[in-house]
Image: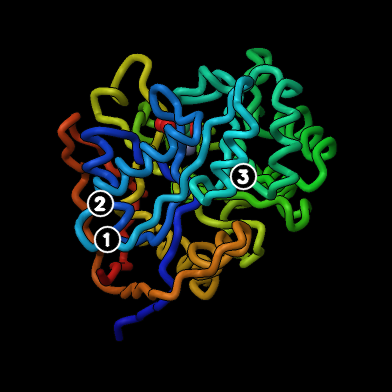
Amino acid sequence: MTQRLTIRRPDDWHLHLRDGAMLAAVAPESARHFARAIIMPNLVPPVVTGAQAAAYRDRILSALPDGADFTPLMTLYLTEETDADDLAAAHASGLITAVKLYPAGATTNSASGVTDFDKVRPVLERMAEIGCPLCVHGEVTDPAVDIFDREAVFIDRVLDPIRSKTPGLRVVMEHITTKQGADYARSGGPDLGATITTHHLVINRNHILVGGIKPHYYCLPVAKREEHRKALVAAATSGDASFFLGTDSAPHTDPAKLQPCGCAGCFTAPNTLSILAEVFDREGALDQLEAFASLNGPAFYRLPANEARLTLTKGDPVQYPPQLETDDGPVTLFDPGYALHWAIQD
Ligand code: DOR
Ligand code: ZN
C-alpha cells in the first residue's frame, strides 16, 4: 500500500541562492517545493544596505519560473559599519525579514563580518527595539579553538553575552551542529530559535574523512561526532517549536569544491524533502515533519503558515540526477548515502 503524507507547504529558513548563472539554475529548485526562504546575503560584495537587498530580491524574482509561488525573505549582512536607520527602514517596509551575523573569517565570504561584537551593540539594540531577528553563524574564529569546538565555545563566549546584554533581541542559531547548540536553543525561551540543516541530520564527521576525503560532505559548521548528529535528529523530530528547517543549501561548482582548498557547502535544495521524510520515517516521527518543515519556522518569524499543501508518497527508491548543470559548471547534489523512498508530488 502506498503511504502518503500531506503537509503544509514547507519553507526554508536558511538558503544560499547566489547570483548570476548559479542563481538562475538553483532558484527554480527551491521554488519547486518551498513557499518562502530566508536568503543569505553573503554575495561578493555582500548585501549590506536596503538598496542592495531590494536589487537582489528583484534578481531572484526574475530568476523564478513563470507562475512560481515563492517569496524570498531578504536579509542584510551585518558589518561594523551597518547603518541602523537604513536597517530599520528596510525592516519597517517589509523589504528585509532578518539580519545575518557572520563572525569575520568564519565561512564563505565572511571577510566583511564582525570582529568586535561591541561595535555592533547599538545596531543589535535597535533590532531588539524594532523586533528584527538576528540570524547567527555561531562559530568562533579564534585559531586556538579546535574547529570541532567552535560552536560550543561561541555559545559561551559570544552568543550568551550578546543575549544577556540585549534583552528582547530575537535570535536564530543557524545550522546548529552540536548537542550543546540544541540544548542551548531548547532552553532559550521564545526569543531563541535554531535552524537545522538536512545534511547535518544525515552525516557525521566520519562520513567526511573515513575511506578518503569527501569534499561534497564538507560544509561549515563542519559535521561533528555521531552523538551530536543524534542530538540534532532528536531535536528536529521532537516537534519542539525551537527547531525548524534551514537547509543551508549552498551550491558551489564541482571545480570549486574539488580543490586543494575546496569550498564549504552542501547542495540539498532538490532532494531535501525526500531526505527529511526518510530521516523522520526511520525515527518513526513522520507526524513531526510538518512541525519542523512548515510550522515552527513561521511561528518563530511571526508569519502565517502556508495554506498550500504538499504531498509525499512512499514507494520505490526515487532517483535524483547526481548533478545540476549550470552555466557556471556542474553542482553535485548532496548524496545521503542511502536510498530515498519518499517522492514529492509536484
Ligand atoms: O558550508 C557552508 N557554506 N557554510 C556556510 O556558512 C556558508 C556556505 C556558503 O555560502 O557556501
Ligand atoms: Zn549558510
Judging by the rendered image, the residue that carries numbered circle 3 is 228
Q: Quadrant of the N terminus?
A: bottom left
**Considering the numbered disc 3 on the image, is that residue within a helix, a strand or a loop?**
helix
Q: Earlier in the sequence, mark 3 or mark 1?
A: 1
Residue to which mark 2 is pinned: 64
Amino acid at circle 1: Ala
Q: Position of residue 182 (x, y in %)?
A: 67, 49
Residue 144 vs 97, above or below: the answer is above
CB within 8 Å, label 1 to label 2: yes
Q: Are marks 3 and 2 in contact (CB under 8 Å)?
A: no
Is 301 positioned to the left or the right of 310 in the image? right
Secondary structure of the residue carrying tag 1 is loop
Can you identify the residue that label 1 sits on? 68
Q: Is residue 191 among the parts visible in the rendering?
A: yes
First-in-chain label (3 vs 2):
2
Residue 198, position in %: x, y? 45, 50
Residue drawn 58% across the image and 59% down it: 236
Left or right of 97 on screen, residue 331: left
Query: How many C-alpha atoms fall within 10 Å of the one at disc 2: few (<14), some, or many (≥20)?
Result: many
Q: Nearer the viewer, residue 330 or 167?
A: 167
Quadrant of the picture in which ligand 1 is shown: top left
Q: Residue at x 52, y 72 (%)?
A: 284
Q: Which amino acid, mark 2?
A: Leu
